Image (cartoon, rainbow, N blue to C red):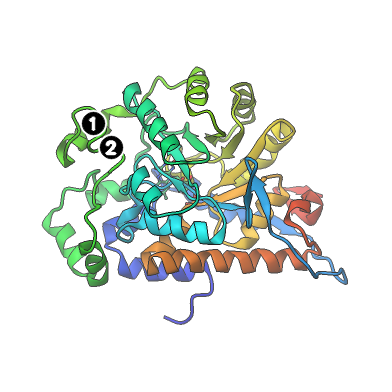
Amino acid sequence: MGPILEVADLKKRAKRRVPKMFFDYADSGSWTESTYRANESDYNEVKLRQRVAVDMTNRSLATTMVGQDVSMPVALAPVGFCGMQWADGEILAAQAAEEFGVPFTLSTMSICSIEDVAENTTKPFWFQLYVMRDRDFVNNLIDRAKAAGCSALVVTLDLQILGQRHKDLRNGLSAPPKFTPKHLWQIGTCPSWCMAMAQTKRRTFRNIVGHAKGVSNLSSLSAWTAEQFDPTLSWNDIAWIKERWGGPVILKGILDPEDAKKAVDSGADAIIVSNHGGRQLDGAPSSIRALPAIVDAVSDKMEVHVDGGIRSGQDILKAVCLGAKSTYVGRPFLYGLGTQGKAGVARMFEIMRTELDTTMALCGERKVTELGRSNLYSAFGEKF
Ligand code: FNR
């Protein structure tokens, strides 16, 4: 298949190695997938300003996220079920992120538990919280993340109700999976995936099973998950979450300047401009298009991060130029995992680092922290 030069190469390989239902689970958005597609394609509307004959030695990609040092402005986004791309995927991705010097965010809906990841890493990682109806369970999750030494809490606000994802429905993918002969055939045609999976006992949602009331196995988990996302979640909930947690709180899923202002009032430390990778409100703007107005509204009061559609270091640079302090990637690291496990995630980081560093140099800049709109020629019809 040739060398792995860009994220698209990892995607092609992951598609061949991972059973179709699990690959599609990653590579899908809600309804028509228009927001999912726009998340990627809108980056083409941001044009860079080329500068020449500038001293480009001693470049630095280092910055901070909620006060924590990162080697470049990217973190791994929380992704549920990511252990289905490669056995123990959450642990492997966390290790790759740790070695690269950027945060890994463990999803509430992950296969490996908070404790599994903590036991297999040496530095703090971040935890993503879904607010469930069972508040005892939520409090306990927060306490477990604290006990495991997690250093930031990402609270996801855009999934009180699940967006409909046609690919998953057509594939008959449920959480937890109920395997039909079609699924078994798909799995059977992916021998290297099966071999890796056979070597782990971590195959269910271990943050939940054995911790939530009445959830002791796969079938009780399915019923519990279906009714637990809390439709009553409100801005008032951020205060008790923040108090119980006691560390940096990042609110994920902000796409509107009015909500960004409410996030400031809630006392959160940062927001992630996000539409859940196009998996929730199809028809919403891409996150890069939504970013500038949100930055203008609140970036003097809190850190603004962004995710959705970032497929290269160039995209990271564009987001930072438009005012994001940092970015997150979801699918790119899933494609890395699906291709080569931990080595694939490491490869994704290397690719993005080179792309970001080269692009920054060709824009005539040496420090990622000094990038701004002045490095852009135009974006979304506005000329800078
Ligand atoms: C997600 N995302 C997500 N977000 C979250 O807060 N909790 C979760 O459990 C999940 N699960 C999840 C599964 C899969 C398969 C995907 C692709 C995404 C959303 C994720 O954190 C992030 O917002 C997007 O993935 C960003 O878009 P890109 O980088 O995938 O384009």
Of the image marks 1 and 2, the number of the one nearer the N terminus: 2
Residue 34 visible: no
Q: Are marks 1 and 2 in contact (CB under 8 Å)?
A: yes
Secondary element at tag 2: loop
Amino acid at dot 1: Trp
Separation of marks 1 and 2 at Cα, in angstroms: 9 Å
Q: Which mark is nearer the camera, 1 or 2? A: 2
Identified at 62% across, 62% down, the residue is: 313
Q: How many marks?
A: 2
Query: Hey, what amino acid is under mark 2?
Result: Ile
Residue that lies at the very extreme toward the right in this rendered image: 53
Q: Is residue 80 visible?
A: yes
Name the residue beneath numbered marker 2: 208
Q: State the residue position of label 1.
A: 224
- Measured as percent of width and height from the top left, residue 100 is found at 55, 61
Foreground pick, 335 / 183: 335
Give percent across and percent down for residue 264. Answer: 64, 26
